[in-house]
Image: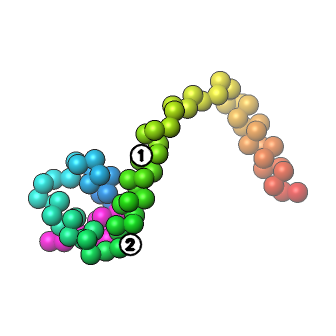
Amino acid sequence: MMPSCKDITEHSSDYLERNLPWWKRPGYWLHLAMCIHCRRYVDQLKLTIGTISKSPDATPPNISTEEIQAIVEKMKQSTKK
């Protein structure tokens, strides 16, 4: 059975990471060969994963929850004006 577009989008990470069961792979290959939209989606996901994996690890800033809440409140106030 060939998977639907919904199936492709829900399991595309498994497909790219080769975690998809062997018996589902031919259906995915066939669907991607026929559906330009899903092929573009999977290609974009592959590009995104590649870009993120090459970026340096980001260290979160050393600020408290209260400071973050204050920043959010300031941002809310500035958008109300």
Q: Dot 1: few (<14), some (14–19), or many (≥20) neighbours within 10 Å? A: few
Choose the circle earlier in sequence order: 1 or 2. 2
Residue at image x 68%, y 26%? 63
Q: Is residue 18 left or right of residue 13?
A: left
Residue at image x 11%, y 59%? 23
Q: Which mark is residue 29?
A: none
Magenta residues, as a range? 1-9
Question: What x and y, as percent, mark residue 35?
Answer: 31, 74
Closest to the observer, 27 or 33 = 33
Asked if 22 appears above or below 40 in the picture, the reply is above
Residue at image x 18%, y 67%? 27
Q: Is residue 17 left or right of residue 1?
A: right
Q: Amino acid at mark 1?
A: Gly
What's the distance in space between the residues labelled 1 and 2, CA to CA? 20 Å
Residue 49 within the magenta-colored segment of the rendering? no
Question: What x and y, as percent, mark residue 37?
Answer: 38, 72
Element class at badge 1: helix
Asked if 64 appears above or below 50 in the picture, the reply is above
Closest to the observer, 50 or 2 = 50
Q: Which mark is residue 50?
A: 1
Q: Which mark is residue 37?
A: 2
Element class at badge 2: helix
Q: Amino acid at mark 2?
A: His
Q: Is residue 63 left or right of residue 53?
A: right
Question: What x and y, as percent, mark residue 2?
Answer: 19, 71
Q: Residue lying farthest top?
A: 62
Residue at image x 29%, y 52%? 16
Q: Are marks 1 and 2 in contact (CB under 8 Å)?
A: no
Classify the position of the N terminus by image quarter.
bottom left
Q: Residue lying farthest right?
A: 81
Q: Dot 2: few (<14), some (14–19), or many (≥20) neighbours within 10 Å? A: few
Question: What x and y, as percent, mark residue 52?
Answer: 47, 43
